[in-house]
Amino acid sequence: MKTNQLTLDIGDREPAGLPDYGIKPVSIRDPLILMIEDNEILLELFNYKFKSLPYDFATSSNGWEGLKVAKTLSPDIILLDLVLPGLPGLSVLKSIREAPFEVQPKIIILSSKNREKDIEDGFELGADDYMTKPFMMKEVLIRVRRLLK
Amino acid sequence: MASQAIDLLWIGIWLLGCITSILIIVAIFTRSVKKWRAERRESRKKEYSTILIGYLTGNIRMDKIEQFIENHPDSIGLMFELSNELQNNLRGNDKQKIQKLLSLPVFINHYIRLIESRSDKKVLRGLIFFRELEWLARGHIQKIRPLLNHKERYIVHAAAIAIMASEDVKDRAYALRSLCRNKDVTRLAVYEVLYRFRKRDKEQWLDEGKHLTLLITDPDLPISHRTSIAIAMGGMGYYYHARYLLDLLRNTPLDDKNVPFIAGLIESLGMLHHPETILEIQRLLLSVNSVLILRASIHALAKIDGKEGIELLFHFLSQKYDLQIQVEAAIHIINIDILAYEWISETFIPDDANPEIIRQIKAEIGNENFLAGV
């Protein structure tokens, strides 16, 4: 799991606090975006984009790890791929929606799965938005901004 | 004797030791080389990813990235993989920028060299690069064209796909014809090329359709591929050529070898929603009992979705047809737009329809008024 310029190893432990992870407490930080995606170059592209904007950005390339990071960092927005190693994206989504967050994160699914059924399942499980790959980078940024309002 | 045996034993042990040592050294060396290669690949990947993203976000100029690729010719394959992976996830301007990058001479020349090699594997690797381009210059097409006559059908297939990036419809039609002349090429391969045959530029559609109609009637092509082209014309929406397909349907003799072709034409016309297809199906029903044609007719009637078409769909509920045909017709009737039900307030159900299927249709529709006349 990576955040801006730092790598986290959460392992199997239930993470306890935030300061060690270099992300500021919820009350004073910039909006935090977590991207759960297994495509390295996409993660790098988003990392680069979001770093140039007033956002904090964290990444995870595995479903299980992504879920843990989400529970630990309470991101404002999660960009979630559906085809992930470990736990599939829809299960990550379901677990997040069932977890006791103080404020539930907004979730944008960003996936190459584009069948009607996939989109329906995504929204039914609580996604706030659904985008299919290939996507336009600008559109993702616009949708993130809209959800943060 | 005893001392000779001991000497031999020592020599044996010594030899075994030498061989083991050599094996260990070779294993260590191979492992180190593999590790070194993997590390070098990883570091090159990181370097290139950073440059590629810098280029995409407008912080690195194209000439810089070109210079980087030129300086690392052994990693061109890796750089293509990364660029391609990214372009497959993007659309709009970002994708166009990567397309520009892949069209750089440094990439093109490398892959042209590969397709000119004698090794089939290298040729295929070269062609895989060209299939990712959205535009191909005439010079490149001329280099790829001879591969359409290659003895290996998978190379002909890859070459045909690569040529689909040409702006000239004649190039694309020639490549499609070359592929279809090969009887061993699968239908799936033909569909894959057909999918890429159509350009986004609507002005080309008329010409594209003309070339496809020529292929449909080309006697040098196997009927299975001609059928695939006919079906694809419907699927891709070549509406201007529906009349031609209809005439072809009328004029194709109804013999055994033409049955799949006729079924393909009906399916295609259904996808083009051509209303006159209904009359042709009516005509065929008088003399045809081929499951292939009956099924194609059901699919077409459901797509055309007009009053006459729906009326005719009910005809397939007759028990003179196979149960499979009755069920397919029932499923399509159930799926017809609700507005169509008004047209069929009077019954069109054949006298000998299967009562169980009729009950299922009524239950699925859930409307007691529907088929009130039954």
Image (spheres, helix red, strand yellow):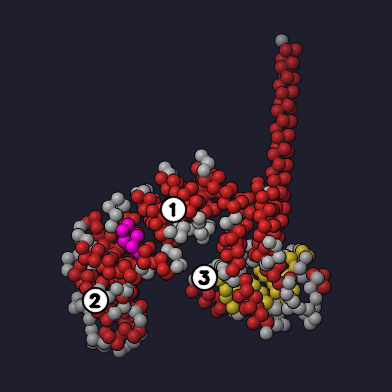
Say if residue A17 shows up in the picture.
no
Residue drawn at (48%, 48%) of the image: B143
The main secondary structure of the magenta stretch is: helix
Please report the bounds of the magenta region as a residue range.
Answer: B209-215
Residue drawn at (53%, 75%) of the image: A119
User: Considering the image in quadrants, where does the N terminus of chain B appear?
Assistant: top right
Q: How much space separates mark 3 and mark 2, taking CA atoms? A: 35 Å
Looking at the image, residue B338 sits to the left or right of residue A44; the answer is left
Q: Residues within 10 Å of mark 3 (few under 14, many from 20)?
A: few
Residue B160 - label: 1
Q: Residues within 10 Å of mark 1 (few under 14, many from 20)?
A: many
Which chain contains the residue that carries disc 1? B
Q: Position of residue B2 (x, y in %)?
A: 73, 12
- Secondary element under disc 1, as helix, strand or loop, is helix
* Same subunit, tags 3 and 1: no
The number of numbered badges drawn on the structure is 3
The residue labelled by disc 3 is A114
Residue B53 - label: none
Which chain contains the residue that carries disc 2? B
Mark 3 or 1, which is nearer the eye?
1
Q: Position of residue B258 (x, y in %)?
A: 24, 58
Q: Amino acid at mark 3?
A: Asn
| Res B201 → quadrant | bottom left
Query: Looking at this view, is B366 or B195 the one in front?
Result: B195
The magenta stretch spans residue B214: yes
Residue drawn at (42%, 63%) of the image: B198
The answer to whether the residue labelled 3 contacts the one labelled 2, judged by CB atoms less than 8 Å apart, is no
Query: Looking at this view, is A29 or B162 the one in front?
Result: B162
Residue B312 - label: 2
User: Considering the image in quadrants, where does the C terminus of chain B appear?
Assistant: bottom left
Q: How much space separates mark 2 and mark 1, taking CA atoms? A: 41 Å
Q: Amino acid at mark 1?
A: Ala
